[in-house]
Amino acid sequence: MIKRYNLRLSSSTEVKVLAQHISMSVFKARRIIDQIRGRSYEETLMILELMPYRASYPILKLVYSAAANASHNMGLNEADLFISKAEVNGGAIVKKLRPRARGRSYPIKRPTCHITIVLKDKSKSFLDESKIPISK
């Protein structure tokens, strides 16, 4: 499996991370992503560490990596980060053949998914919204 992580700095307060070809079902990963969408970074880490699902581990690694990239590359404080957007899309299906009796074979289909997480900085996003010109 090829696991590729992309980091994209879209604006001054936003970090986008993409993990591709994660070997799990889209529905199992969405169950976890729906729980963490819109939450702060620390709260997300606590939720993901305590969830009993196997799908929470790759998502935890991805969130942790995104926060480390935001802190190192952009100088953002990890305490001010929150998950503004999180989505899971379907990836390619890995197809194999399982040998059966009398020379027959049954297909094995392993689903993969692509996970996208966008972190934003609370303090800077609120400052950007407050820069509305005041008319006198």
Image (spheres, rainbow, N blue to C red):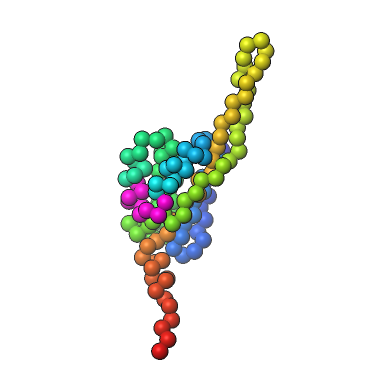
* Vertical position of residue 34 compared to residue 109: above or below: below
Question: Which quadrant of the figure has residue 13?
Answer: bottom left
Residue 72, can we see it? no
Quadrant into which the N terminus falls: top right
* Vertical position of residue 70 compared to residue 95: above or below: below
Tell me where residue 60 appears, x and y as whole percent: 40, 43
Q: Reply yes or no: does residue 67 show up in magenta.
A: no
Taking the spot 55% from the left edge, 37% from the top edge, the residue there is: 112
Quadrant into which the C terminus falls: bottom left
Q: Is residue 12 left or right of residue 93?
A: left
Taking the spot 62% from the left edge, 14% from the top edge, the residue there is: 100
* Vertical position of residue 82 compared to residue 47: above or below: below
Taking the spot 67% from the left edge, 13% from the top edge, the residue there is: 103
Tell me where residue 48 appears, x and y as whole percent: 36, 43
**Magenta highlight range:** 37-45
Question: Quick one: which residue is furthest to the right in this view?
Answer: 103
Question: Quick one: which residue is furthest to the top in this view?
Answer: 102
Question: Which quadrant of the figure has residue 57?
Answer: top left
Taking the spot 42% from the left edge, 51% from the top edge, the residue there is: 37
Question: Quick one: which residue is furthest to the bottom in this view?
Answer: 136
Identify which residue, 46 or 33, lies in the foreground: 33
Q: Is residue 81 left or right of residue 103?
A: left
Tell me where residue 24 appears, x and y as whole percent: 50, 35
Question: Which quadrant of the figure has residue 104?
Answer: top right
Residue 107, can we see it? yes
